[in-house]
Amino acid sequence: MTQDHELRVGKIRNGTVIDHVTGGQALTVLAILDIDGSGGEEISVGMNVPSDRLGRKDIVKVEGRELSQEEVDVLSLVAPDATINIVREYEVIEKHRVERPEEVVGVLTCPNANCITTAREPVDSRFSVLEDGVRCDYCGTLIREEFADHIGVE
Amino acid sequence: MRHDHVLTAKQFSRADIEAVLDRAADFDRPTGDTRHTDSLLGLLFFEPSTRTKMSFEAAIKRLGGDVLDMGSVDSSSVTKGESLADTVRVIEGYADALVLRHPQQGAAKMASEFVDVPVINAGDGAGHHPTQTLLDLYSIRENAGLDDLTIGIMGDLKYGRTVHSLAQALTNFDATQHFVSPESLALPPEVRYDLDEAGAAVEEHTELAGVLPELDVLYVTRIQRERFPDENEYRAVASAYGIDRSMLEDAKDDLSVMHPLPRVDEIDPAIDDTDHATYFDQAHNGVPVRMALLDSLL
């Protein structure tokens, strides 16, 4: 059944299939990956398709791109049940579930404009991962939702 | 207590706090003990300060040491665009410990990652002020004790760094904390998160009158004019969160009124000569407490 739904949104030749994304979160996943279509990326998205494990799930297939660990770390915050499938020549050569990291470094921008990490200082942002969000290690600010809005540290 | 850096009150255990306060009690009497004659304390104040800066200076001098004062930001290399990270790396070579006040939250923590000497957070924006908390606790212990304590904390709870640090430190003790503020200046979510995590007994209020009779300590903070875009809005709020002698008729006889100072309008000067007024003693306690802290770090 799952395979049928994956087929519904098309197989990819080389790239990444992000499966078991929490239903309705596919667009957030694309935002995390900084994909809005303007770069000509080849993307397939299935939203709210039936899932034995999750009831409803989203699937995102990205042609020609393998995700970095930093991207997977942030992705785990909005899609904790997601599986990452690396595809080469139509074959899944690697498959693993995302794991919530203990911290996320250099990926999220602190929403507190008065945090030292937003100043012109040689320091990366660093967030500790909590059960229900993340917390800036420097100023303590909590982020519990809209993670994609805070991505963008160089 | 032995920490390489003093960054937030969250790092203090009850034993840490009691060790500093006990040591401070020793320093509260002139000892002539100048045990740190070779110590130089670097003062880096990127924001104005009177009490904190001068009490650190007094503390190190009473220990036999001396200060290296960066001076005002206007007369430092900061005006040339030097980063804080570079500044502390340079001053690290001159001083045995750094006392840093900076307008940005997390500045002391970042600085601590660039130097090997102890960094003491003397206030980081609206974040923390852990050494103020130590002297606050010293004063509370002297006047009301630190257990079975009911404390009201009133004023600007959102941006008040002394409040954030005090609230976190009080979770080490058997204290009920009543927070009183306008809704717009209530505790920030991250402080409330820490209090909830610690299982602290916390209540939030918008008016003092209902809770005042229960309090052993009322800790008043200044509502900061600069936070309000509209002067009339500030005046309306500020006048609602001040106290005068008539209000204290409903308080316990031994209620201790505290304030980190400077005050503006929030405590009527007529309270100064009552037994409730603790705030000037509180400020004086900054010296022995900071002596004790420096003695443990240097």
Image (cartoon, rainbow, N blue to C red):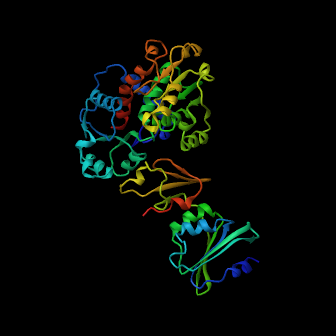
Q: Is residue B210 left or right of residue A141?
A: right
Q: Is residue B119 visible?
A: yes
Residue at image location 46% in from the left, 23% down from the top: B139
User: In x, y percent, where is residue A33?
Assistant: 54, 69
Residue B78 at x, y = what percent?
27, 48
Residue A81: give x, y in percent of width and height.
Answer: 66, 65
Q: Residue at x 43, y 21 (%)?
A: B279
For the N terminus of chain B, give its image quadrant: top left
In which quadrant of the rendered view does residue B121 lie?
top left
Residue B260 left/right relative to A141: left
Count of marks, rendered view: 0
* A54 up-or-down from B11: above or below: below
Compared to residue B243, the image places residue B181 above or below, namely below
Camera sees residue A98: no
Residue depicted at x 70% and y 82%: A7
Q: Quadrant of residue B50?
A: top left
Measuring from the top left, give residue A143's x and y in whole percent: 55, 53
* Residue B97, quarter of the rendered image: top left
Q: Nearer the viewer, residue A103 or B29?
A: A103
Q: Residue furthest bottom?
A: A89
The quarter of the picture where the C terminus of chain B appears is top left
Q: Nearer the viewer, residue B230 or A38?
A: B230
